[in-house]
Image (cartoon, rainbow, N blue to C red):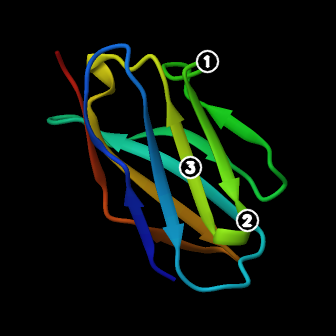
Amino acid sequence: VQLQASGGGLVQPGGSLRLSCAASGSGFRLTTLGWYRQAPGKQREWVTTMASGGNTAYADSVKGRFTISRDSAENTWYLQMNSLKPEDTAVYYCRLITLGVEYWGKGTQVTVSS
């Protein structure tokens, strides 16, 4: 399994971005997909998770602004980020757990700045 995160970029405060996390392979079962982020000089932090049944959870810092979703046919997960703030600036990573095995994708840079 390989994960590819994409969609990062430079956006002004208040703007939006949609990140994608595409998983190669097939037959994913019992999957949990999480988004994490790491700002310069800080530890990596959890942002959101979607379980295989569709249940979602969000960090308080992004609740109401970020939305995780999945296109099962394409084995792709999305992170819609609205009302972005400068403190959302970080490298964003996706993490997939399937059948008890963990995979991480390379990060994508999100910069929120005027």
SS of the residue at dot 1? loop
Q: Is residue 65 left or right of residue 36?
A: right
At a point 51% along the width and 83% down the height, the residue shown is 1
Mark 2 surroundings within 10 Å by alpha-carbon count, few (fewer than 14), some (14 through 19), many (20 or more): few
The residue carrying mark 2 is: 72
Cα–Cα gap, marks 2 and 1:
23 Å
Specify the amino acid type for callout 3.
Tyr
SS of the residue at dot 3? strand
The residue carrying mark 3 is: 78
- Which mark, residue 64? 1
Is residue 62 or residue 78 the one in the foreground? 78
First-in-chain label (3 vs 2):
2
Mark 1 surroundings within 10 Å by alpha-carbon count, few (fewer than 14), some (14 through 19), many (20 or more): few
At a point 45% along the width and 47% down the height, the residue shown is 19
Callout in the foreground (3, 1): 3
Is residue 2 or residue 82 the one in the foreground? 82
Specify the amino acid type for callout 1.
Gly
Q: Quadrant of the C terminus?
A: top left
Callout in the foreground (2, 1): 2
